[in-house]
Image (cartoon, grey):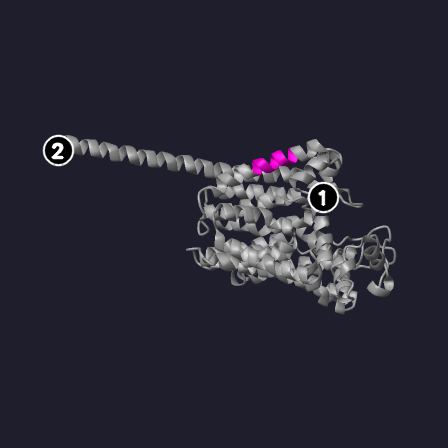
Amino acid sequence: MLEPAATAAKTLMGCFLNRWPLRTPCLLSLLVVVALYILSPNFVQHRGSAHPYAGDFLQEWIGGWVVDQGEVRRLYDTPYIQKIQHDPHIIGFAWDESRYLPMVYPPCYYLLVSPFSWLPFHVAASLWAMLIVVCFYLSWLVLARSHRATDSRTTTTPSIHWSWLMSFSTLYVPFLENLASSQKATLGMLAISGSWFLLRTNHPFRAGLVVGLLAVKPQWLIVVAACMAWQRQWRFMGGIVAFAGVYAILCLGMGWDVCWQYAEFGVQAAEYVHHPGYETHRTHCLYGAMVLLSGGSTNWWVRGLSLIGYAGVGCCLRQIFGQGPRWRTFDGVMQWTSMWIATVLCSPHWLTYDLTLLVIPCATCLLAAPVALRPAMTVWCVAFFVLSSISPQIAATTGIQLTTVMLLLAIGWIAKQFKTEQVLRSGAKQVTRDNTLIQQVMSLQHCS
């Protein structure tokens, strides 16, 4: 009696999955997102909480409030910011007064988010949460469109693949941290997927404009700009410069003194690891991993080893990007992915929730990978998916950040693939030249 019921259930489930390949994973991912917001301690406020309501959104709201109040010159005044972040008459709640969230973004960013401060804090936090969730889903829709635009297969199969990857990615711990702490990594996901789509459809200037959105965190664009300049992608670079120029004009329009204050903060970015409450075991870049390994020191040998690591990453990128852009092929996918992996490694700070940005490049690789490489890439992605959730705990105990090691292995493996291809191509050219010479000799003999 149970067997027919089980068979009927499987049949119904199969029909559901086949009829709505997109609806099912979207529904599952939405359930995870809703459960996260219901269960997250950051969205259950009580007096004396260790963290503010909605996590780090407080610094966005306060930054916008300071700009709206005409106190732009005090935007990076730590005592002033710390005071108003704990004023219940302004924010509407109380939290641990020994903590505060520093202003870490360019002045123009707080100008752009200032409309949120026109609303009560809790209402603004809800709108911000909706915005970052919408960015997440839009990034996947854009990725699906870019995949279909350059894929020769039917549209049904790619839709199932990308939609289920989207569903699984909602269980990715960095993504859950991003939502719980109201971070903006999903905006980065949308910029990456949009830029990738525009590159593959031969719109490099627009692609540069879209990725220029990430200039609110300048360290996210350093490696990108270097790689594109190396390939002489000047239209793409023009897009980045155009958007960054708009940011610069907005900042200068807010006052030279506040720009200078931000520049002073940026120069000391490497010392941010000494900021009270900074959790070194949750950083995944090369410099952070070296600081963690040294027990929190930033002495000369930590900086020296970091520079050696940067040089190694640079050598890998030279191998990967030294053969010209190939955006419509799998080689282009590998170039794009390695560029974002290098961005993580070379950034002065890259916390766990920022790893969310790697979701789109990794998914792009899995969707476009040839059959021979797909098993190895799937194993790496699954291992990284799991390790990202436990690596901070392991790092806190051992002092070794395993995700950094995995990223180094990944970019080294990609560079090796390009080196092997270069050797094979050189060999093929040599064989072609030898055959041509033989044909010429035989032709001369025949003539004689």
> Which residue matches tag 2?
447
10 Å crowding of disc 1: few (<14), some (14-19), many (20+): many
**Res 12 → quadrant:** bottom right
Secondary structure predominantly adopted by residues drawn in magenta: helix
Please give the name of the residue rendered at 14% of the width and 32% of the height, measured from the top-left corner. 446
Toward the bottom, the furthest residue is 118
The vertical placement of 61 against 385, above or below, is below
Comparing 311 with 426, the one in front is: 311
> Which residue matches tag 1?
282
Q: Amino acid at mark 1?
A: Arg
* Residue 325: mark in rendering: none
Q: Which residues are magenta?
A: 305-313
Please give the name of the residue rendered at 74% of the width and 53% of the height, measured from the top-left corner. 261
Q: How many marks?
A: 2
Comparing 111 with 101, the one in front is: 111
Foreground mark, 2 or 1, reads 2
Task: Say what secondary structure mark 2 lies in.
Answer: helix
- Quarter in which the C terminus is drawn: top left
